[in-house]
Image (tube, helix red, strand yellow):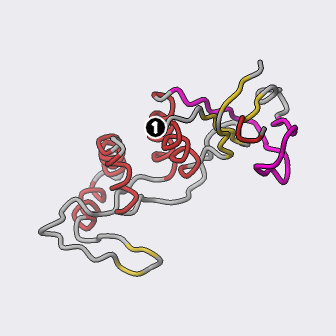
Amino acid sequence: MDKQVDVVVVGAGPVGLLLAIELKLGGADVMVLERLTAPNLGIKAPSVGPLGAEALQRRGMGSALAEAEDRTFAAMEPAGVEMRARTFSFRGHFALLPIRSDAEREPERRMRWVDQQGLEAILGERAAALDIEVRRGCSAPGGISPFSRSDPMRSPNGACAGSTSRAWR
C-alpha cells in the first residue's frame, strides 16, 4: 500500500506522539513509525512535571491525566493517600532546580504521578482520535535526513513498505 504523508515522525514515545499531535493540529498529514512492536513496559519516568502537565491540559488531555493519576494512587492503596497529600506540596523541578509556585495562588501547578506508559497511552488515544497512523515494528533507514529521497522505511513484516513522506521528496 502506497501512502503519501507530509511528515513522518520516527518514535512513538511521549515526544514523538506529542509532536505528531501538534503537527496534525497544525494541518499536516502525519504518520508515526516505531521500532518496537508494542509499547515498552520498562519503568522509566514515574511522573509528568508541572510544565508538561500544563501543556497537556492546554491540549485537552487534562482530564485523562487526572484519571491516570487517580489510578496510580488507587493502585498504591493506603500509601497512595499519603503520597497524594505530599504531591500537593511538591511542585516539581527543572534540571533539579525547584520550580517556584505559590500553592495558594496556583494549586494546580504541580507534577502528576502518571508514569511513562500511562502518558504514552493518553497520547496514543489522542493520536488515534486525530486519525494519526502509528506503525509499529518499523525502522527508518540509517542517517535519515530531509535530503534523503528514496530510502524506504523498513520492517520485517513489510508494515512500512510503500510509505513515503512528501517532506523527503
Q: Nearer the viewer, residue 8 or 36?
A: 8
Q: Main secondary structure of the magenta part?
A: loop
Q: Is residue 167 left or right of residue 153?
A: left
Q: Is residue 60 left or right of residue 142?
A: left
x%, y% of residue 2?
Answer: 77, 21
- Residue positioned 82% across, 34% down in the render: 155
Which quarter of the figure is the N terminus placed in? top right
**Which residue in the structure is indicated by mark 1?**
25
5 vs 65: above or below: above
At label 1, the amino acid type is Leu
Residue 136's x, y, as percent? 69, 35
Numbered marks: total: 1
Residue found 13% across the figure and 67% down from its top: 105
Residue 53 in percent (x, y) is at: 36, 55
Q: Which residues are magenta?
A: 131-154
Say whether residue 151 is magenta.
yes
